[in-house]
Amino acid sequence: FLEPFVVPHFVGFSVATFEAGQTMMPAHAHETLHEFFFVLEGCAVFVVDGVEHKVGPMTFFHLAPGERHGIYVPEDSVDGAMKMAVFGVVTNR
C-alpha cells in the first residue's frame, strides 16, 4: 500500500465510482494541489471554472491549482456508473 506523502509531493491514488445523479462534491479549488483524473468507465461532467466538459472512458484530465472544479454524473445518464482513477501532486507554490 502507498500511504499519502510517502513519495514526496504525491498525495495518493484512488478509484472512485459515482452513480447517475451523484455529485463528487460542490465546486472547489485547491491552492497547491494538481489533480489528475482518468475515466475508466461511464460518463460524467467536469465543471471547470464554470465551463462544463463531458468526459467518457479513456479521458485523462488535469486540474491545476486554483482551477475551481466539480464533477457529477447526470441523473438521466444511460451509461451506468462512472468509475475513475484519481491522484494528486502537491506543489510548494
Image (spheres, rainbow, N blue to C red):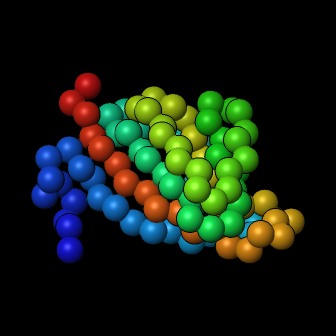
Residue at 68%, 50% in the rendered image:
55
Image quadrant of residue 57? bottom right
Residue at 14%, 47% in the rendered image:
8
- The answer to whether one can see residue 56 in this image is yes
- The answer to whether one can see residue 72 in this image is no
Q: Quadrant of the N terminus?
A: bottom left
Question: Does 69 appear above or below 10?
Answer: above
* Residue that protrudes farthest toward the right in the picture: 76
Residue 46 position within the rendered picture, expressed as x and y whole percent measured from the top left: 64, 46
Residue 91 position within the rendered picture, expressed as x and y whole percent measured from the top left: 25, 34
Image quadrant of residue 2? bottom left
Question: Does 71 appear above or below 21?
Answer: above
Q: Quadrant of the C terminus?
A: top left
88 left or right, relative to 53: left
Residue 86 position within the rendered picture, expressed as x and y whole percent measured from the top left: 43, 57
Image quadrant of residue 83? bottom right
Residue 29 position within the rendered picture, expressed as x and y whole percent measured from the top left: 48, 37
Residue at 42%, 45% in the rendered image:
35
Question: Does 10 appear above or below 65?
Answer: below
Q: Nearer the viewer, residue 23 or 3?
A: 3
Question: Does 52 appear above or below 45?
Answer: above
Residue at 55%, 35% in the rendered image:
68
31 left or right, relative to 69: left
Counting the numbered discs, the total is: 0
